[in-house]
Image (cartoon, rainbow, N blue to C red):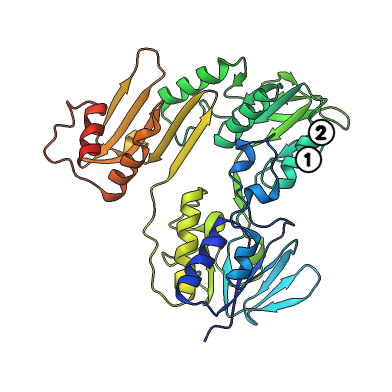
């Protein structure tokens, strides 16, 4: 008989684990320990509306009374500093201990901050928590030029919000193109052109090695010796799993907390899900995957055998008047062929990645209406046995999918 289910972390993986548990068992004790003072909220909304009124009530994953109605005890602003897997206890910041029968680690990740000269100066930020946003909002009014380091989705959304707020924004990317894991070369070029169309600088192949200024940011220095003036620097250069809690335990870690397809760690009764969980050597760090992993962990915690079969990774961007999505495998080295269509004005671009007569990935710019159809085709592994994929157009294939 399970008495206490303890969940460390208050993100979307944790909330969906609770939903799965309550589908099976309405009586089990569930305790969530959240190190922020806010109720669990939509982190993906932070950079999408950087200067919106991000009131806690408007961005919560669930209303406050949901936790009470589901018999969940939520400990806010409570840091877990250690885990004793021998005694089945978590250790809190005040030294108190709390026992568990089943433990779910859903404590996510933190933004990577490079060890460069000046990183601790005033007006250097990253965006991971609601308080990060509020700190930026409190200090930005007298700033003219803001430099964002990182050309992924978060960085691009941040720069778009800065532009709309009337600031001069500069986007700096270490690699040779934007969103290299989600977009091919041509799609990255289209995105870069769209950003520059709003008089926003994009600097590729640029590495920041120093932040200039005495106490406050005055600019940055790049590896090739160039200096760029700026009043604020925001880093959006990737994430690192919050695995430090496991350092003195037998729980296996690598880049994250290693789990199997039931979200189980190598230690009995200890599970992990979301951005902290490493499955098959990878941490994907996407919202839809955290949801499914949380569900899988929740079911297995209460004895319902559930295997995480994986979901299609989906990345969506709406910024600089351009809409795009990328899903599945978009590496041309891992497919048999690709089908490409692009409009003459470059406002529409579609590329489908084919392997064994199945769509395994897609990049689409300018037309999101086919995203669900493509996602279903990838997930269901639909085989196009009666179609000459070498000679069919993207739109024709999409129409066949839509009518099937």
> Where residue 46 is drawn, which disc sits there?
none
State the residue lying farthest toward the bottom: 1
Residue placed most toward the observer, 374 or 87: 374
Q: Residue at horizontal 47%, vertical 60%?
A: 293
Label 1 crowd (10 A; few <14 / some 14-19 / many >=20): few
Measuring from the top left, give residue 80's x and y in whole percent: 71, 66
Q: Which label sits on residue 139? A: 2
| Residue 96 x, y percent position in the rendering | 77, 76
> What's the CA distance linking mark 1 and mark 2?
6 Å
Q: Is residue 187 left or right of residue 90?
A: left
State the image coordinates of residue 85 (x, y, percent, origin top left): 62, 77
User: Is residue 162 in view from this perspective?
Assistant: yes
The residue pinned by badge 1 equals 135
| Lateral position of residue 18 relative to residue 357, left or right | right
Mark 2: secondary structure: helix
> Is mark 1 in CB contact (under 8 Å) with mark 2?
yes
Q: Residue furthest right?
A: 214
- Give the residue at x 68% y 23%: 169
Is 245 rendered above or below residue 59? below
How many numbered markers are drawn?
A: 2
Left or right: 62 as drawn, with respect to 264: right
Q: Residue at x 83, y 25 (%)?
A: 142
């Amino acid at each position: 008989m399970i008495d206490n289910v303890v969940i460390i972390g208050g993100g979307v993986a944790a909330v969906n684990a609770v939903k799965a548990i309550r589908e099976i068992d309405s009586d089990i004790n569930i305790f969530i320990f959240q190190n922020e003072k806010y109720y669990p909220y939509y982190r993906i909304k932070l950079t999408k509306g950087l200067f919106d009124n991000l009131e806690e009530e408007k961005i919560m994953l669930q209303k406050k009374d949901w936790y009470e109605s589901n018999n969940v005890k939520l400990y806010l602003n409570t840091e877990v500093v250690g885990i004793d897997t021998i005694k089945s206890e978590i250790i809190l910041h005040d030294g108190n201990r709390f026992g568990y029968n089943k433990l779910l680690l859903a404590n996510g990740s933190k933004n990577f901050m490079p060890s460069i000269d000046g990183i601790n100066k005033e007006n250097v930020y990253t965006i991971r928590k609601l308080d990060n946003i509020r700190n930026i909002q409190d200090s930005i009014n007298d700033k003219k030029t803001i430099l964002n380091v990182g050309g992924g989705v978060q960085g691009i959304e941040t720069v778009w919000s800065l532009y709309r707020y009337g600031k001069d924004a500069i986007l700096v990317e270490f690699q040779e193109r934007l969103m290299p894991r989600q977009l091919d070369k041509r799609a990255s070029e289209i995105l870069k052109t769209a950003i520059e169309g709003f008089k926003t600088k994009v600097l590729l192949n640029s590495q920041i090695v120093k932040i200039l200024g005495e106490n406050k940011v005055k600019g940055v220095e790049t590896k090739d010796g160039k200096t760029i003036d700026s009043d604020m620097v925001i880093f959006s250069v990737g994430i690192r799993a919050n695995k430090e809690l496991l350092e003195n335990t037998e729980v296996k870690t690598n880049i994250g907390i290693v789990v199997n397809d039931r979200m189980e760690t190598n230690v009995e009764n200890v599970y992990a899900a979301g951005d902290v969980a490493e499955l098959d050597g990878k941490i994907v760090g996407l919202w839809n995957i955290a949801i499914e992993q949380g569900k899988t962990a929740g079911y297995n915690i209460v004895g319902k055998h559930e295997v995480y079969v994986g979901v299609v990774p989906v990345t969506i961007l709406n910024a600089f008047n351009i809409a795009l999505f990328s899903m599945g495998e978009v590496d041309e080295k891992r497919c048999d062929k690709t089908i490409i269509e692009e409009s003459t004005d470059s406002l529409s671009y579609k590329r489908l990645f084919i392997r064994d007569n199945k769509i395994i990935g897609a990049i689409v710019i300018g037309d999101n209406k086919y995203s669900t159809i493509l996602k279903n085709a990838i997930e269901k592994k639909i085989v196009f046995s009666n179609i000459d994929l070498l000679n069919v157009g993207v739109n024709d294939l999409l129409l066949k999918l839509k009518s099937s």
